[in-house]
Amino acid sequence: MLYRENGQFKTAYGADQQIFPIAQDRIGILLLLAFAVFAVPLVADEYLFRAILIPFLILSLAALGLNILVGYCGQISLGTGAFMAVGAYAAYNFQVRIEGMPLLLSLLLGGVCATVVGVLFGIPSLRIKGLYLAVATLAAQFFVDWAFLRISWFTNNSSSGSVSVSDLKVFGIGIDQPHEKYLLCLAILILFAIMAKNLVRSHIGREWMAIRDMDVAAAVIGIRPVYAKLTAFAVSSFIVGVAGALWGFVHLGSWEPAAFSIDRSFQLLFMIIIGGLGSIMGSFFGAAFIVMLPIFLNQALPALGSLVGVTISTAAVAHTELMIFGGLIVFFLIVEPHGLARLWSIGKEKMRLWPFPH
């Protein structure tokens, strides 16, 4: 009975169009944000920040951008790692080549550069779709990997091919400690999540979903496929580019093109499939699942093996992780195509109706 909205009357269109129209949702989100901002920096240790929280926030941001393209607009992409790499290397070049360049501006300009590359490789979506579009975006992955490996200008003529950043500052405040990096990523994620939620509820978001459901019918009723598809690629690539810059600057500190390989693209695709296509919340669920599962398996499988008297190697743990990923993707595609976000929605609906059986 705690989740019923009886007595919550909406007397204006603005109240009816809130992101969280139910008071319990608003209270829950505010409590969660307060816990994340004030309590987590006080109780979490360095390992928790570096291994779980910061990767979760950045990958959630990247999954959010990919979900706009794949989940909301229906354009398959296998080049997300490439757009992350463009954002990271572009932000790095802005940071090292322009004296006094603010960190936040470098991150945003990295997203802008990723937008340009994303739109460029999104142009084939005007003529092809499905598997053919996936192959076209996969070409972006291989091209970007080659460019950052072979063109030394992108790495500031580094002999090893790797780049590094240090002494991060935001508004003159140093971002060196793990909790400071966590708060920076959290603030950027909250800002982009609100922006993405409002975008998908706006007219452009409805155009994306119309293109996803049936592009021919969408064109018949006056929606411009060129505009809808390219704006989806632009917005998605911008968010993914900022996530890539954060991944390089905040999480890694020093990286090379292998950090944004095709494995990263598949990992992000797995996130939105498991978390839920076409769902902002699903991006968070998928990122949490992908980040937590390897850590859980690395701890649980050796412990389980010791209980039964069997030694489980790290290679076996890695292979088990891949098998579980594959099995879960097949499971969600067959049983619940909308992923964990749909299960969450079903649970909320049942809470709204409980204890009534209908």
Image: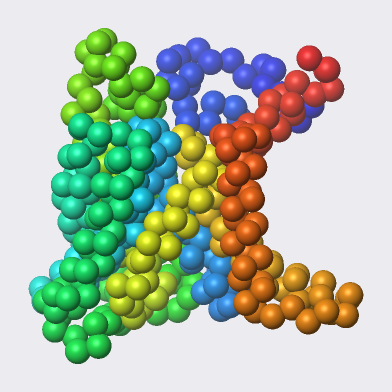
The quadrant holding residue 180 is bottom left
Residue extending farthest to the right is 308
The quadrant holding residue 261 is bottom left
Pick the residue in front: 203 or 321. Answer: 321
Q: Give the color scheme: rainbow, by chain, secondary structure or one colour.
A: rainbow
Residue occupying the point 60% across, 44% down: 330
Q: Note whether residue 100 is visible.
A: no
Pick the residue in front: 83 or 92. Answer: 83
Residue extending farthest to the bottom is 159
Residue occupying the point 53% across, 15% down: 10
**Number of numbered labels in the structure image:** 0
Q: What quarter of the picture does the C terminus occupy? A: top right
Pick the residue in front: 307 or 32. Answer: 307
Q: What quarter of the picture does the N terminus occupy? A: top right
Residue occupying the point 44% across, 55% down: 266
Residue 229 image offset from top left, x and y in percent = 25, 33
Residue 264 image offset from top left, x and y in percent = 41, 61
Q: Is residue 46 left or right of residue 160?
A: right
Q: Note whether residue 287 is visible.
A: yes
The quadrant holding residue 316 is bottom right
Residue 355 image offset from top left, x and y in percent = 84, 22
Please say if 38 is above or below 317.
Answer: above
Q: Is residue 26 left or right of residue 139?
A: right
Residue 300 image offset from top left, x and y in percent = 75, 70
Residue occupying the point 28% across, 37% down: 232
